[in-house]
Structure formats: structure tokens, C-alpha cells
């Protein structure tokens, strides 16, 4: 059986094409001057530059963390270029017609709904191509509702008060090594503000794509849901195939004020590297949200890409009765390594959190779940439920679970369940005896394993995620 | 023994698992429309025969040959055997958590139809059929939504196997102790399920320990499988003899006792 599964897994990366777009790229290297130039390119106000520089100085003092269950050669931060913008974007396009057709074709290949009719389906897209936000669609309809959805570089110019108030408020500049680096050099990303009592009229969506060789991509996303508001945000990622590893160190901050709700869904399909682990994305991401009273933040992620993933979407449950959720599917194959999980920090009374993590390992990959649940002294009556399931395909892969539990309030309840299972010979035989080929059998069993997480994704995304898993497992190149 | 007009022909079959010889020179011929019951002591190799015929990995054929409707069965992949019309109802059905029965059955039917070059069945049409099949095996329709065998009781699992058979419409059905662990009503359900599917172009191998099932099903032939081969064949009355006398009297019987097809 193992042989068949191996065959099924040996597929090529579907999104592995390189766009032929002329771009403007900084020479590799990082110092204060580079940061000044990034800030200058973006016409940033002085306070923003100062913010970046102070983060950079902090970063210089920090050490690259090595506690994760991942193994990769040391990154030479001086060999990376910190800015790349498609040249034609210098004068920003005012409408789709003005967008470089080659760019649009790239998006088309990725299946991003930039076309008018597709937008009518209700998806507003902020597409980040390397570092500059290319075009933000459907902004008008959102503006009507008072929703702000724009590139963060634009928000810095147009809504400095909001940005100043919330940027770095959830993930402090010196939170961790990669976050500090991101603060210093981030080039673009999305900004969302949902006004009080507003239900965002559509799903918001950003697609990230790394195109330029040797460019690190450092997006910065900030979502603020004002009191009683509601928003669902989708993030999709792909990157072209390269020999050299590319670095991706994003920061996402979510602020859910009283009674607000943010649902953040990610389907991540960065290039995972070849069978031997060559190439592929290093994905070091800091994602964190803060919940005020009665607020709710829900992270859902489907991770199938990257050669190395280091990612822990977290919730700080500050307000009483606030709710944090984390639903995750992480698939690793080939020589992929993933160390992912979440942190639920319970500060307020009666705060609740749910963690459902599904790790699937195939090939020679390593998949680790690392989760922290902390009940602070004030977290009276708080509850956490964690379920952590691992599925092994074949016998050369690994699954690891590292739960950290800290309870400083005796009234808090923490439940943890963990299972490890294999795609069994019996299951494979049953499927094949009913006429399914082995590839379909594996993908069906894996999809079933992930069901609890998939049902948390928005409809279209759930279908997409299922397909992505199937592609990841099947070798059916489109 | 002649091959003409035979659905399944097993000739001098030897098979082993983990280097242990289990099937030791087995012969059997089944014509379209026939129902053959196989009985025999625990560990005789009845389930093994089903696995070998359906191509389960880990079971190796050491000799002999098997033809299904004239095709060399042993050369075919597991899924191709299924698509060619071979169906095995498992003695111990396995769970596939999170995959709904309906999803699983639709995918199976789709795969088989596609392989045979038949048109795909619409979801609505399929749902109608599936509901009817549920009804026939006396399972609530809600079982279509549940994960395959997930948390099913022993009897429910067996009925679920039968439901799959009803939907897949195979030409050779191997039922491995589908009657074990069933209550009396369910036994009737299984028997009726089989009887309703009996037709001139569908054959059955019914593995059972109980003559009671055979009272309902009325097999054309009854075989006794012992130590990897068929040691005695007869008509339905053989089941009664076995019920009365057990298998002991057969252990010393000449092994060459073959079926006169
Ligand atoms: N994987 C295996 N490794 C070793 N021996 C095996 C294996 N699978 C089956 N056997 C042996 O093969 C023999 C036949 O098993 P089989 O399941 O076919 O018997 P059976 O006739 O179906 O019995 P029952 O009536 O109890 O269902 C048994 O002795 C069993 O222990
Ligand atoms: Mg058996």
C-alpha cells in the first residue's frame, strides 16, 4: 500500500509558474538605509519610519528562535532583497483596465476572481503581488457600508489615527524575532475596519503570492472590528516554484472590540519544495487576535504548502465571556516540516476556547502540533477544549504533539484529547473493493479526517480546501 | 469442469498470508444465477478465500487460476475486480470516520460506472436509490449521513454492507458471514435482500455458520471448506446434516471430494 500512496503523493506543484512582469527590486541587504528607502518608496509619514526603525533596532538585539521542531539551514538576512514591486505599478492603477495584463493572467492562473462577474459573487479581493497591493476590488460597495478594506500602505496615509492606535497593539514590535523583522521591513498587506454594529456585506479576501526571486515577503495585516460588528476574512497563498528557498514572515493582527466577531480563514499553498526538500517557502508567521468583552475570534487554517512552517494563530481572551477558536488542518508530505498550533490566553472571566487540530503527515515529512492554553488568575470559570488528531500515511513520516497547559485559576477547566491514527490497510482495501482507485481512496479518507475543520470554512473555501488536499495527495496536475 | 457459461471458475488455487499457506488446492465453479453456500470450521480459510478473490494486499497466490466471466481475475487490480462486478461484504466491516455513507457510496458507484463507460448518475437520482436501499435493509435514512460504519452496531454494519451491495449491483456477491450477530428480524432482512437480488445474471457465495440463513435463502449448492480446500459439496440438505453432526466426521474425508458442476 505504501508504494501506491507514495506514487499518489508524487505530484507537481500546480501554481509553480513565474510571471514575466518587469519589476523594481532592491539589491539584497538590510540596514537602516534600506528601511528608509522602503518607507520613502511608500511615501510614509515620519512616525511610521520611526516605528520601523525602532523595531529594526530591537530586532538586531534578538536571537533567531530554535525551539521549534523544524530543521533548516541558517537564513542569511543580508542575502535577501527587501523590496520588490512590479514596475508597472509605480503609478497605481485606478481600475482593472490599467492593470498589467500579465499580472491579471497570473491571477487568472491562480483562479482569483478579479473579473467583474466573479466579483458579483460577493468576494472583494485585495491581491498582494510580491509587495505592493495591486488592486482592491469592490471597494465602493464596502465604502457604502462604512467598511474600510484597502492596502495597509494606503491606510497609513488615509487613516493614520486608526493605524497608529492599533498597529502593534496585539503583536508588539519585539514580540518575536520574525515579527520584529516584519515591523521593520513590511511592504504591504491589508487593512480592514468594520464600523460599530456593522455586518460586513461580503466575505473579504486577500491572495498573497511570492513571485520575485530572493524576495522575502513581509505582509502586514490589521483587522479592526468595532463594537458589535462582524467580518469574515479569507486569505489564500501560493508561490511559484524556485530552487532557492524564499522567506515569508507575515504579521496578522486582529482586534475584536466588545461584542464583535472576526472569522479569519486561511488556505495556504506556498511552494513546499521538491521531493528532496529543495526550494520552497520558509513560512514564519505571527498571527494573533485580541477579544474584548463578549467578542469572538475564530481562526481556521488549511495548510498544505511551505517547506518549513512556523505558525501559531492565537487569541488573547481579554474581555469577559469572550471566545477564541482554532481549527486547523496541516498536511505535510515530501520533506515538509510544520510546527504549528495556537495559543489561547484566558484573561477574562468565563472565557471559552476551542482548539481542533488535524495533522496529516505523509512521505518523509514531520508535522508538529504545539499549543499553549493559559488560564490567568482572573480567568474565573474559563474553559478550554482541545482535540488534537494526527493521521499518518506511510511509515516514514512523523507526528508530534506538544501541549503546554498553564492554569493559574482553580475554577478553570481544561480538557485535552489527542489521537494518532494511520490510513489503515483495511480502509484502503474497503475503498478499493468498492471500486475506488488508491488515490481517490486516500484523499477521501483524509478528507473525512478533516471534516470537523472543513465545516468551519466558508462554503466556497471548503470546496477549494477539499480540492487542494486532493491535489496535494493525488498528483493530478491541472 | 467446463468454462463455458461459467461466471467464476477457481482451479487448484493455493494462497498464503504472511508465508502461511491457507488455501490449499481449492476448486469451485459458479454459474450465473447460482447461490453457493460455504460452511466450515473457524480458521478454515473462508474469509481468506474472499480476500484472495477480491485482491487484498498481503495475500499472495502461490498456484492455480481464477477466471471471472472469462477474465483472468488474479491479474487484475483490486479496484478493477470490483468494477468487473465482484463484491465482498466484509465479515468485520471497517470504519471510515468523517466520510459519510452517502459520499462513499456515490463515489463508489461513480467510479464503477465510469470504468464501465456508463453515464454518471445524478446526485438526486442517487439519493433516491440510496434511500430506497436504506429502507430495504431496514436502516433509518439518517445512516446515509453518518460516517461509514462509524459507531454502527454490529448488526447495523452488516445491514450497511448489504445496502452497498444493493446500490453497486454486482454480478458476483461474496457475503462473508453477513448473518452473524444479527437478530432474528435482521436475519430475515438479509435473506430477503439476497433473495430480491437473485437473478439469472447474478451469483452469490454465501459464507455462513448457520443453516437457519440457508432455510431462507435456499442455496443451489452447499460446500464445506476445511483446511483450505473444499472437502464436501452437496445440495441444501448438506447444511442440515452439518447442523446435526458438526464438521468432525468430514475431517478425515478424502480431500478430493470435488464439486460436480
Ligand atoms: N495476517 C495473517 N497472518 C497469519 N495468519 C493469518 C492471517 N490472516 C489469516 N490467518 C490465518 O488463516 C486462517 C484462516 O483464516 P480465515 O479468516 O480465512 O478463517 P475463516 O474460515 O474465515 O474463519 P471464521 O469462521 O472464524 O471466520 C486462520 O488460521 C487465521 O489465523
Ligand atoms: Mg471468516
Image (cartoon, rainbow, N blue to C red):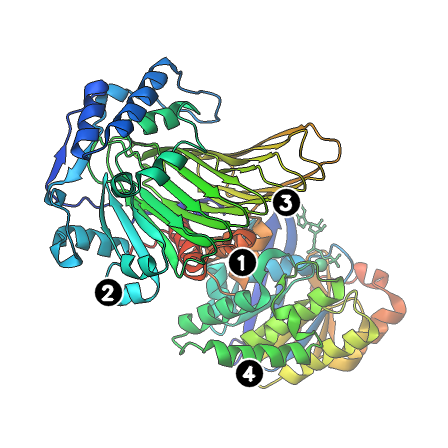
Q: Residue at label 2?
A: A116
Residue at position x 17%, y 30% in the image: A40
User: Ligand 2 sits in which quadrant?
Assistant: bottom right
Residue under the point 39% across and 16% down = A62
Q: CA distance from mark 2 to mark 1?
A: 52 Å
x then y, percent, for residue B199 = 60, 85
Answer with left or right where residue A160 lies relative to residue B129: left
In this view, the residue in front, A157 or B149, is A157
Q: Which residue is mark 3?
A: A321
Q: Which mark is residue B55?
A: 1
| Measured Cα–Cα span from mark 2 to mark 4 | 56 Å
Judge the density around disc 3: few (<14), some (14-19), many (≥20) Cα neighbours within 10 Å: many
Q: Nearer the viewer, mark 3 or mark 2?
A: 3
Q: Are marks 2 and 4 on the same chain?
A: no
Question: Where residue B209 appears, x then y in whole percent?
Answer: 79, 66
Mark 4 highlights which residue?
B201
Amino acid at each position: 500500500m505504501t508504494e501506491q500512496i507514495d506514487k499518489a503523493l508524487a505530484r507537481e506543484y500546480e501554481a509553480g509558474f513565474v510571471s514575466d512582469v518587469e519589476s523594481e527590486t532592491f539589491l539584497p541587504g538590510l540596514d537602516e538605509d534600506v528601511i528608509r528607502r522602503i518607507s520613502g518608496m511608500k511615501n510614509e509619514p515620519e512616525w511610521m519610519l520611526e516605528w520601523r526603525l525602532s523595531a529594526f533596532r530591537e530586532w538586531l538585539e534578538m536571537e533567531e528562535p530554535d525551539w521549534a521542531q523544524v530543521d533548516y539551514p541558517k537564513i542569511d538576512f543580508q542575502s535577501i532583497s527587501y523590496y520588490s514591486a512590479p514596475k508597472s505599478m509605480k503609478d497605481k492603477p485606478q481600475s482593472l483596465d490599467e492593470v498589467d495584463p500579465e499580472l491579471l493572467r497570473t491571477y487568472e492562473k491562480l483562479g482569483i476572481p478579479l473579473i467583474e462577474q466573479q466579483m458579483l459573487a460577493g468576494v472583494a479581493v485585495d491581491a498582494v503581488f510580491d509587495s505592493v497591493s495591486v488592486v482592491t476590488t469592490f471597494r465602493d460597495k464596502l465604502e457604502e457600508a462604512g467598511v474600510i478594506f484597502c492596502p495597509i500602505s494606503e491606510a497609513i496615509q488615509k487613516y493614520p489615527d486608526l493605524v497608529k492606535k492599533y498597529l502593534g497593539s496585539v503583536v508588539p514590535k519585539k514580540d518575536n524575532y520574525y515579527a520584529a523583522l516584519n515591523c521593520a521591513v513590511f511592504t504591504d498587506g491589508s487593512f480592514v475596519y468594520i464600523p460599530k454594529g456593522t455586518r460586513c456585506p461580503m466575505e473579504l479576501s486577500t491572495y498573497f503570492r511570492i513571485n520575485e526571486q530572493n524576495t522575502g515577503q513581509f505582509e502586514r495585516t490589521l483587522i479592526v472590528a468595532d463594537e458589535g460588528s462582524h467580518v469574515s476574512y479569507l486569505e489564500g497563498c501560493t508561490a511559484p516554484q524556485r530552487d532557492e528557498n524564499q522567506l515569508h514572515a507575515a504579521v496578522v493582527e486582529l482586534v475584536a472590540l466588545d461584542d464583535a466577531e472576526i472569522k479569519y480563514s486561511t488556505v495556504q499553498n506556498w511552494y513546499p519544495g521538491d521531493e528532496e526538500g529543495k526550494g520552497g517557502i520558509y513560512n514564519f508567521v505571527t498571527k494573533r487576535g485580541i477579544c474584548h468583552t463578549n467578542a469572538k475570534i475564530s481562526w481556521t487554517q488549511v495548510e498544505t504548502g511551505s517547506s518549513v512552517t512556523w505558525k501559531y494563530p492565537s487569541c488573547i481572551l481579554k474581555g469577559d465571556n469572550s471566545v477564541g477558536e482554532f481549527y486547523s488542518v496541516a498536511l505535510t508530505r515530501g520533506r515538509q516540516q510544520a510546527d504549528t498550533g495556537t495559543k489561547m490566553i484566558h484573561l477574562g472571566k468565563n472565557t471559552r476556547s476551542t482548539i481542533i487540530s488535524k495533522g496529516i503527515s505523509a512521505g518523509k515529512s514531520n508535522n508538529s502540533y504545539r499549543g499553549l492554553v493559559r488560564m490567568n488568575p482572573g480567568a474565573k470559570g474559563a474553559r478550554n477544549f482541545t482535540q488534537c488528531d494526527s493521521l499518518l500515511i506511510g511509515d516514514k513520516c512523523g507526528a508530534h504533539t506538544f501541549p503546554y497547559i498553564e492554569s493559574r485559576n482553580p475554577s478553570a477547566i481544561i480538557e485535552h484529547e489527542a489521537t494518532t491514527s494511520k490510513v489503515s490497510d483495511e480502509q484502503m482495501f474497503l475503498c478499493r473493493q468498492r471500486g475506488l482507485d488508491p488515490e481517490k481512496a486516500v484523499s477521501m479518507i483524509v478528507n473525512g479526517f478533516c471534516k470537523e475543520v472543513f465545516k468551519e470554512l466558508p462554503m466556497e473555501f471548503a470546496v477549494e480546501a477539499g480540492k487542494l488536499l486532493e491535489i496535494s495527495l493525488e498528483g493530478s496536475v491541472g | 469442469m467446463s468454462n463455458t457459461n461459467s461466471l467464476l471458475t477457481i482451479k487448484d488455487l493455493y494462497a498464503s498470508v504472511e508465508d502461511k499457506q491457507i488455501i490449499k488446492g481449492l476448486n469451485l465453479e459458479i454459474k450465473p444465477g447460482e447461490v453457493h453456500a460455504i460452511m466450515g470450521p473457524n480458521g478454515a480459510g473462508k474469509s481468506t478465500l474472499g480476500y484472495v478473490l477480491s485482491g487484498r494486499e498481503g495475500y499472495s497466490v502461490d498456484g492455480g487460476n481464477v477466471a471471472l466471466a472469462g477474465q483472468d481475475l488474479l491479474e487484475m487490480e483490486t479496484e478493477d475486480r470490483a468494477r468487473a462486478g465482484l463484491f465482498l461484504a466484509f465479515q468485520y466491516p471497517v470504519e471510515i470516520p468523517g466520510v459519510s455513507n452517502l459520499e462513499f457510496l456515490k463515489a463508489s458507484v461513480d467510479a464503477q460506472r465510469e470504468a464501465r463507460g456508463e453515464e454518471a448518475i445524478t446526485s438526486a437520482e442517487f439519493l433516491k436509490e440510496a434511500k430506497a436501499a436504506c429502507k430495504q435493509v431496514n436502516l433509518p435514512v439518517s445512516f446515509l449521513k453518518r460516517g461509514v460504519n462509524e459507531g454502527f452496531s454490529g448488526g447495523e454494519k452488516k445491514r450497511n454492507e448489504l445496502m452497498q451491495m444493493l446500490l453497486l449491483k454486482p454480478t458476483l456477491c461474496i457475503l462473508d458471514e453477513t448473518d452473524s450477530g444479527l437478530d432474528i428480524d435482521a436475519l430475515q432482512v438479509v435473506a430477503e435482500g439476497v433473495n430480491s437480488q437473485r437473478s439469472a445474471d447474478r451469483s452469490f457465495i454465501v459464507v455462513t455458520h448457520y443453516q437457519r440463513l440457508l432455510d431462507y435463502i435456499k442455496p443451489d449448492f452447499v460446500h464445506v471448506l476445511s483446511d483450505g480446500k473444499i472437502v464436501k459439496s452437496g445440495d441444501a440438505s448438506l447444511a442440515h446434516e452439518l447442523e446435526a453432526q458438526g464438521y468432525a466426521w468430514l475431517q478425515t474425508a478424502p480431500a478430493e471430494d470435488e464439486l460436480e458442476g
